[in-house]
């Protein structure tokens, strides 16, 4: 078994296969703090991280942004006082690709808990 | 008449009066790109800013964060590829204070359009 955190993202083409319903449970099992969301018919995964103040939340936001730029795959990052909500999905396939789970695992690694 | 952009924020106490329904139209008139939203029964003002890429969006997010810290009043900032959505409201009064409109005007000034 290969853990998500050890995997590399692959180039995502328009026709690149997304994650199937059958694959979801085992991927989500590796990301216990992430929840599955559906917005405008597109599946996404989302986690809310807590911080002591706004400055710490912004520092985390910048760390996630750096990760996103390094992989050229970008989440939605909602920054508020004391919390940051990160949402990963793949626009090109209007849903979830394995890359989203790999980057969610890497996002967790950035969290200074 | 004093324009919002020229005004200073005032200390906001729990019982500090919010903006009244009668005051709303003239304040919103000064902020034509902002829309009034209601979430969980709390009024907010929100604007979506567009950018050419993720890096420019993040740079703006950091500028807004710096403004927020300088006034010790913090909006919700949603950063995505090519866009940033800023939402101002005042938690303490569960709605809109004049400070929110002043900071919305200052947020507009940060936008490099």
Image: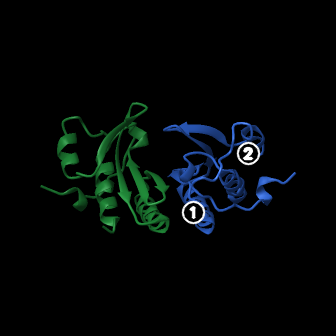
Chain colours: A green, B blue
Foreground: B112 or B10?
A: B10
In the picture of the structure, the residue carrying the numbered disc 2 is: B31
Residue lying at 17% horizontally and 45% vertically, measured from the top left = A26
Q: Chain of mark 2?
A: B
Single out the residue that lies furthest toward the front. Answer: B15
Residue lying at 36% horizontally and 57% vertically, measured from the top left = A49
Along the horizontal axis of the image, is B103 left or right of B2?
left
Q: Secondary structure at mark 1?
A: helix
In the picture of the structure, the residue carrying the numbered disc 1 is: B65
Q: Position of residue B85 (x, y in %)?
A: 57, 48
Q: Residues within 10 Å of mark 2 (few under 14, many from 20)?
A: some
Closer to the N terminus: mark 1 or mark 2? 2
- Is residue B64 among what the camera can see? yes
Q: Is residue A18 above or below residue B76?
A: above
Q: Position of residue B70 (x, y in %)?
A: 62, 68
The C terminus of chain A: image quadrant: bottom left
């Amino acid at each position: 078994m290969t853990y998500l955190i050890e995997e590399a993202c692959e180039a995502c083409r328009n026709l690149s296969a997304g994650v199937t319903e059958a694959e979801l449970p085992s991927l989500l099992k590796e990301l216990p703090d992430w929840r599955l969301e559906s917005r405008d018919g597109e599946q996404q995964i989302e986690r809310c991280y807590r911080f002591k103040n706004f400055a710490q939340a912004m520092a985390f936001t910048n760390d996630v942004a750096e990760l996103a730029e390094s992989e050229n795959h970008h989440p939605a990052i909602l920054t508020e006082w004391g919390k940051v909500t990160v949402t990963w999905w793949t626009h090109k396939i209007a849903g979830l690709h394995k890359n989203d789970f790999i980057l969610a695992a890497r996002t967790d690694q950035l969290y200074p808990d």
